[in-house]
Image (cartoon, helix red, strand yellow):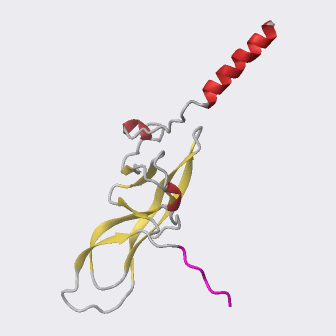
Amino acid sequence: MKKLLLLALLGVSLTACANTPKIKPIAQNANDTAPFPTAQEGVTRYAIHLPAIADENNAKVEVIIGKEMNVDCNLHNIGGTVKQEELKGWGYSYYVVEKAAGNISTLMACPEGSNKNQFVTLNHNLGLFNYNSSVPLVFYVPNDLQVKYRVWQPKDKILEANAE
């Protein structure tokens, strides 16, 4: 009889646990970046906190690293590398810009007065990031660079390719 009562009590408690609503943790404050290392001298830490959206699986994030420069009509880029590092014990990634150097450009002859201010970007091979509102995207970049981003989401239906 005691075993039956214990089994019934266990069944009720398991049912209660199974019916408890799942709550997605949302923490959009300064503590989000607390486990990440602080920026060293000469480096700025940028954190991209994405808001929750309806379908995060279909969204991507493009990260643009660069700086505002006065340039001529040539195509300009900043040389450098971005290294992905892991936050030990957490499994999160963060990204460090290394060796950001100079202005790489084409060498066309430009007409006088063609200079303009433009955001010149660092070419990196990071591609698009998965959209994740739970964890910030964290970048460490030299003080003279900035981090910007844009969110990509499909607007149209999926089209079929022709088999040839």
Q: Specify the quadrant that holds the N terminus.
A: top right
Q: Is residue 133 above or below residue 130?
A: above
Residue 65: image location, x then y, percent: 39, 63
**Residue at the far top in the pictured view:** 2
Tell me which secondary structure the magenta stretch mostly adopts. loop
Indicate whether residue 159 is drawn in magenta: yes
Q: Is residue 87 above or below residue 16?
A: below
Q: How many circles with numbers are drawn on the protein? A: 0
Left or right: 155 as drawn, with respect to 158: left
Residue 78 falls in image quadrant = bottom left
State the extent of the magenta-drawn residues as a range.
158-164
Residue 2 falls in image quadrant = top right
**In the image, what residue occupies the spot 41% across and 67% down?**
101
Residue 60: image location, x then y, percent: 48, 62
**In the image, what residue occupies the spot 52% across and 64% down?**
126
Residue 87: image location, x then y, percent: 55, 43
**In the image, what residue occupies the spot 71% across and 18% down?**
10
Indicate whether residue 137 is drawn in magenta: no
Q: Is residue 137 above or below residue 112?
A: above
Residue 30: image location, x then y, percent: 37, 38
Left or right: 163 as drawn, with respect to 69: right
Q: Is residue 32 above or below residue 74?
A: above
Left or right: 78 as drawn, with respect to 127: left
Q: Specify the quadrant that holds the C terminus.
A: bottom right
Which is nearer the eye, 100 or 82? 82
Which is nearer the eye, 163 or 69? 163
**In the image, what residue occupies the spot 44% across and 70% down?**
155
